[in-house]
Amino acid sequence: MDLFDKLENRVSPLGPFTSQGYGYYTFPKLEGPLGPDMKFNGKDVVVWSINDYLGIGANPEIRKVDTAATEKYSLSAPMGARLMTGNSDEHEALERELADFVHKPEALLLNYGYQGIMSVIHCLVDRNDFLIYDELSHACIVDGKQLAMGESSVFKHNDIEGLERQLQRAVSRMKPNSSILVVTEGVFGMTGDLGKLKEIVALKEKYPFRLLVDDAHGLGTLGHDGSGAGTELGVQDGIDIYFGTFAKSVALIGAFVATEPRVKEFLKANARSQIFAKSLPLPIVVTARERIRLIRENPQWREKLWENTLKLREGLRNIGYNVLPSESPVTPVLTEGSTELCMTIMRELRENYGVFVSGVAYPVVPKGMVLIRLIPMATHTDEHIEKTLKAFEAIKPIVFENVPEKAATA
Ligand SMILES: Cc1ncc(COP(=O)(O)O)c(C=O)c1O
């Protein structure tokens, strides 16, 4: 059969979302300056779907830095992979600053988080090793597992006893040159709960393993200084490889891992997605340095983010929504229903109330569940929050149509 003909019959994992929803439910186009007030399909909307937690994407100071760096260096430079011709003093300075920010001896820049972490897992885990990861891990970790040569297993989400069983099993089957890598997340991006890092780090007393934490949503939002979930939970030292991306709080592209010098040296020579790909453009590196500096110098952005998060969450809870026990700014609203209900909620909010949210249904969440995710930003105001709460109040009869006791209070 022709390969392309076959594609027509392949079911997309996101089902009707991808086939029916182009430009609306999938690939929507938000326009205007980045922030809580943007345009969608020509309408003004309050946006709760972009991960610019600290609101720095539209910061005028940063935009000036972006322009000046682009004029100075061009978007092309440097050409080549870092290993060949793509290195610069700026890249190395950013790595030192990132390491300092997240309290690790060294950091290694990655062109993109997704490919970067896949490569890191791939090159760390050889055929004699064991990889154990949380079942709710991001797709980049699951894909890293596909590449890794060793044996892999999952533990149920945040189930420490389950992890311990997997560790016992791995230990019982280890050869003299076998090692174990455990991978989890600092913040789980859909549900907002934190990885049980304290408990996992405590297991290091009993079992020989190294811990890699993907802290995409924790960097900049958690910890007294914004250095993430490890700091928040008091176990940053117990994380052997800390992964952060610029795609959320830094509102940019690029990522890094922070670890000890010998591991960085190994990754520099072995992480294939970095060795065989062009390095980050200099203006990106220059603006990343500035953004990290500003994030460190402006803790009030993080405080405002949290103030907004708590107001939004409390408000949603008060009007009867299940916001799950999220411990990060990620604010999930979980309800019962079908893919159609998920689409109806998004459409109602966008069309009738000027509120832009994103939602997911099966197979991203279990069948019969709908999860609407709101991402607060430091730049949301009380008016944005009030407008959104009013909208959620107004759509209760639709959301709880099939949930009798909730509908009765609507
Ligand atoms: C938990 C998590 N890990 C990794 C990534 C990938 O990072 P990047 O966007 O830098 O490729 C994302 C998405 O951005 C993410 O949410």
Image (cartoon, rainbow, N blue to C red):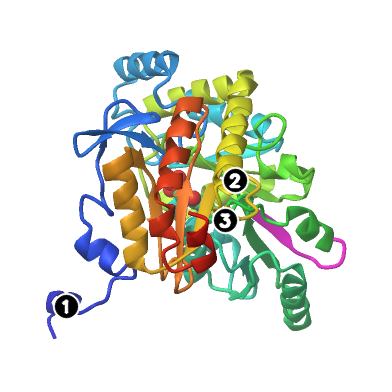
Per the image, the residue denoted by label 1 is 3
Per the image, the residue denoted by label 3 is 322
* Residue at (66, 47) in percent of width and height: 327
Look at label 1 and name its amino acid: Leu
Per the image, the residue denoted by label 2 is 318
Task: Give the quarter of the image for residue 210.
Answer: bottom right
Q: Earlier in the sequence, mark 3 or mark 1?
A: 1
**Closer to the camera: disc 2 or disc 3?**
2
Look at label 3 and name its amino acid: Asn
Judged left or right of residue 150, residue 16 is left
Viewer-proximal residue, 90 or 266? 90
* Residue at (41, 70) in percent of width and height: 362
Q: Is residue 69 above or below residue 376?
A: above
Q: Earlier in the sequence, mark 1 or mark 2?
A: 1
**Cβ–Cβ below 8 Å for labels 1 and 2?**
no
> Residue 261 in the image: x percent, y percent?
68, 42
Residue sitting at the far front: 408
Q: What secondary structure is found at the residue carrying circle 3?
A: loop
Q: Bounds of the magenta span?
A: 205-212
Viewer-proximal residue, 94 or 30? 30
> Residue 202 in the image: x percent, y percent?
83, 58
